[in-house]
């Protein structure tokens, strides 16, 4: 009796889970199939049908020749813009966050709790609030419309999060390790290098994924602080979709959207395992 | 070399004063043991000696050199932490040699030291393992090895044996004693274990609430305690405390087994001088025994025992004096027939008396 009701409940749970999984996967499926169809087939309106004659036309166009406003070079240049913004921003904010978190967790100093509180507060400041002051700052620094400027914005905004991640991870490391290493003659950086760095793989993965996703997907900063030659891919995608020459090319739009989303997908697949492990190991505890 | 002088040292965390003016002079090569109830500031004092915690006021000197504000790595002190604090990602050999590595000792020399230390502590076969792959006792030895590798001027041990099982603890205790004999390095050692304190120490420092209560040899602490706290803290089972009336001339009166005994203690002149009507008599269980004809100084009495606790070598028997609980230490044979109206003998040559108000010793 209990046994059969147990399996009955099991069945229900799986059904619900499958339904939700389908709900999430259907849009992806539609995007993928649409991007492989030609425009004639799309006009027939069979949204869920598999493509009759799969073609990469939409993909090549989206990548290299679709119009994003006045110029028609596809997403490629903007993809590389994004890479040039994301890579330094992620690397710098992660390294700064690691050092900050280490210092805040293990080297208490006068005002360190307050500094941490302020950083925590930084996590909750909405993007919109800092738009204007940041624009002023970038202009003053002569970094308006530059890749360096965007990197700086993302580093500043990201450091609050990365510091929080690392601090919460390092807080659970016994302080006596630091004391022992101090007696062994190691200084601030030597202790970080020899004792903290070797145990940090999970939290580095979490931070890398988090920062990569945040910065790659960012639209607001990208649209506000970039110039004509420095727009990131999200902005270009928006322009591509909104630039219509003649009829709307849904297949190109879909291919472009997938191209824009692909790097974050790849990162998740490659490092997702560590991501979950790292979240539970670091961010939750402490 | 290796002398240590702690002068009027205090420590406050915010508004709470944890150490209230500690003075200890440690001779070169001395083995000092710090004891005291949990939270009395022992670890804090150790951390301050090591330089891991700042000194609020007072000074610390090593070999006559003021080190109050010297950084930990320039003090030439090695410490074994209660939790071992082994570096989790390094193997045993690197754990031991890390301090040398940080001090720029070359590789060949480091390997030689690791081999020496490992042989001494019998951990040669574990050198490639990570700390997580070791048993508690092995970790403890690695922690010792890390301290030994540097041959410092002063060793600090903060409850190093507290995580070990009873047998291993006895073994390690002997090892530490041998080590101290061989190296002759100054050691400051925290423990909650009475036997460790009594067997290892040259001198014991008893602390309470951030105040040093007494500093003396184990015999002084045991036989000549400075106050009731020290008397009650050292010794297991602890000293009996009985509130008694005083008589003219400083004698005391106590009712044992229905009879009132008038006793003249070694400190009777002191009691007389103090003019107290009541004092607290301190008498250790082993001073109340079955009659021993060979001891002619003993005072004969008889009393009732309600509870008998055989402990192997001795039997503890619990009864009452002046209506207050008291423990006697009998031989196993005497213990077997102890009960109502049992003959006992008192040795009052080491009895002490304390002020009822503040527990100060009356001498
Ligand atoms: N960083 C700190 N901030 C505030 N109070 C502290 C701090 N470290 C220790 N204390 C307090 O100082 C007192 C002494 O602590 P300490 O660790 O020296 O005790 P202990 O004698 O070593 O005790 P135990 O035998 O339990 O190890 C305790 O009351 C503790 O709460
Ligand atoms: Mg302690």
Image (cartoon, helix red, strand yellow):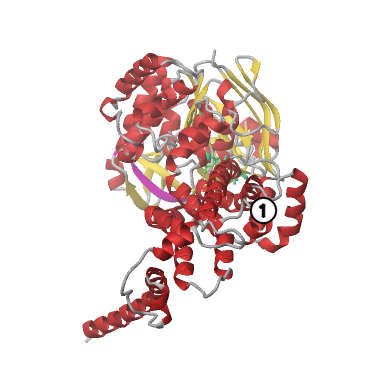
Q: Residue A220, position in %: x, y?
A: 64, 61
**Between residues B243 and A132, which one lies in front from this camera angle?**
A132
Q: Is residue B344 left or right of residue A104?
A: left
Q: Is residue A251 above or below residue B210?
A: below
**Chain letter of disc 1?**
A
Q: Is residue B317 magenta?
A: yes
Q: Residue B314, position in %: x, y?
A: 32, 40
Which quarter of the picture shows residue A123?
bottom right
Q: Residue B362, position in %: x, y?
A: 63, 34
Q: Residue B280, position in %: x, y?
A: 59, 43
Q: Is residue B68 magenta?
A: no
Q: Is residue B34 visible?
A: no
Q: Is residue B229 left or right of residue B195?
A: right
Q: Is residue A254 left or right of residue A105?
A: left
**Between residues B228 and A15, which one lies in front from this camera angle?**
A15
Q: Is residue A80 above or below residue A30?
A: above
Residue bearing mark 1: A227
Q: Which residues are magenta?
A: B313-321
Look at 58% across and 53% down and name the residue there: A161
Which quarter of the picture shows residue A15?
bottom left
- Quarter of the image with the N terminus of chain B is top right
Dot 1 alpha-carbon crowd within 10 angstroms: few under 14, some 14 to 19, many 20 or more: some
Would you say the magenta stretch is mainly helix, strand or loop?
strand
- Quarter of the image with the C terminus of chain B is top right
**Between residues A187 and A193, which one lies in front from this camera angle?**
A193
Element assignment for label 1: loop
State the residue lying farthest toward the top.
B1
Which quarter of the picture shows residue B179?
top left
Look at 60% across and 36% down and name the residue there: B227
Q: Is residue B41 visible?
A: yes
């Amino acid at each position: 009796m209990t046994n059969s009701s147990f399996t009955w409940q099991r069945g229900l749970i799986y059904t619900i889970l499958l339904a939700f999984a389908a709900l999430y996967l259907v849009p992806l499926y539609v995007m993928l199939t649409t991007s492989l169809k030609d425009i004639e087939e799309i006009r027939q309106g069979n949204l869920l049908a598999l493509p009759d004659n799969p073609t990469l036309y939409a993909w090549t166009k989206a990548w290299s020749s679709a119009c994003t406003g006045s110029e028609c070079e596809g997403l490629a240049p903007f993809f590389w813009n994004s890479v040039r913004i994301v890579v330094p921003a992620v690397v710098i904010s992660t390294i700064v966050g690691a050092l900050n978190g280490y210092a805040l967790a293990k080297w208490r100093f006068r005002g360190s709790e307050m500094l941490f509180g302020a950083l925590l507060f930084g996590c909750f400041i909405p993007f919109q609030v800092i738009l204007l002051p940041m624009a002023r700052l970038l202009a003053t620094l002569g970094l308006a419309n530059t890749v360096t400027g965007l990197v700086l914005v993302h580093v500043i905004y990201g450091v609050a999060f990365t510091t929080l991640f690392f601090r919460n991870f390092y807080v659970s490391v016994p302080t006596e390790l630091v004391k022992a290493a101090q007696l062994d003659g190691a200084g601030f950086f030597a202790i970080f290098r020899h004792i903290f760095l070797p145990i940090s793989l999970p939290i580095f993965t979490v931070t890398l994924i988090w920062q990569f996703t945040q910065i790659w997907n960012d639209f607001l900063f990208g649209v506000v602080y970039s110039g004509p030659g420095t727009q990131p891919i999200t902005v270009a995608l928006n322009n591509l979709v909104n630039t219509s020459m003649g009829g709307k090319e849904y297949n190109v739009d879909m291919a472009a959207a997938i191209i824009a989303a692909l790097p974050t997908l790849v990162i998740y697949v490659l490092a997702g395992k560590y991501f979950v492990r790292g979240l539970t190991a670091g961010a939750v505890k402490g | 070399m290796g002398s240590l002088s702690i002068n009027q040292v205090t420590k406050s965390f915010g508004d709470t004063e944890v150490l209230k003016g500690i003075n200890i002079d440690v001779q070169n090569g001395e083995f000092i043991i710090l004891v005291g109830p949990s939270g009395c500031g022992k670890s804090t004092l150790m951390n301050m000696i090591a330089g891991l915690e700042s000194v609020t006021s007072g000074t610390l000197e090593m070999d006559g050199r003021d080190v109050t504000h010297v950084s930990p790595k320039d003090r030439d002190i090695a410490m074994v932490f209660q939790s071992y604090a082994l570096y989790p990602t390094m193997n045993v050999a690197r754990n031991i040699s890390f301090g040398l590595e940080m001090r720029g000792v070359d590789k060949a020399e480091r390997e030689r030291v690791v081999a020496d230390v490992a042989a001494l502590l019998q951990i040669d076969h574990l050198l490639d393992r990570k700390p997580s792959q070791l048993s508690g006792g092995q970790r403890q030895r690695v922690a010792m090895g890390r301290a030994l590798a540097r041959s410092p001027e002063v060793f600090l041990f903060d409850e190093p044996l507290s995580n070990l099982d009873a047998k291993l603890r006895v073994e390690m205790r002997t090892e530490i004693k041998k080590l101290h004999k061989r190296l002759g390095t100054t050691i400051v050692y925290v423990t909650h274990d009475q036997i460790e304190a009594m067997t290892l120490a040259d001198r014991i420092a008893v602390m309470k609430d951030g105040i040093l209560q007494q500093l003396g040899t184990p015999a002084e602490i045991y036989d000549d305690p400075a106050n009731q706290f020290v008397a009650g803290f050292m010794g297991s089972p602890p000293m009996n405390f009985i509130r008694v009336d005083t008589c003219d001339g400083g004698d005391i009166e106590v009712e044992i087994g229905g009879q009132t005994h008038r006793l003249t203690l070694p400190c009777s002149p002191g009691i007389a001088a103090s003019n107290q009507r009541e004092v607290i008599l301190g008498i250790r269980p082993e001073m109340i025994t079955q009659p021993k004809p060979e001891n002619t100084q003993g005072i004969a009495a008889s009393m009732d025992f309600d509870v008998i606790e055989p402990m192997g070598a001795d039997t503890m028997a619990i009864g009452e004096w002046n209506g207050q609980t008291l423990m006697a230490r009998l031989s196993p044979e005497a213990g077997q027939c102890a009960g109502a109206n049992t003959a006992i003998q008192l040795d009052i040559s080491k009895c002490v008396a304390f002020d009822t108000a503040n527990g100060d010793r009356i001498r």
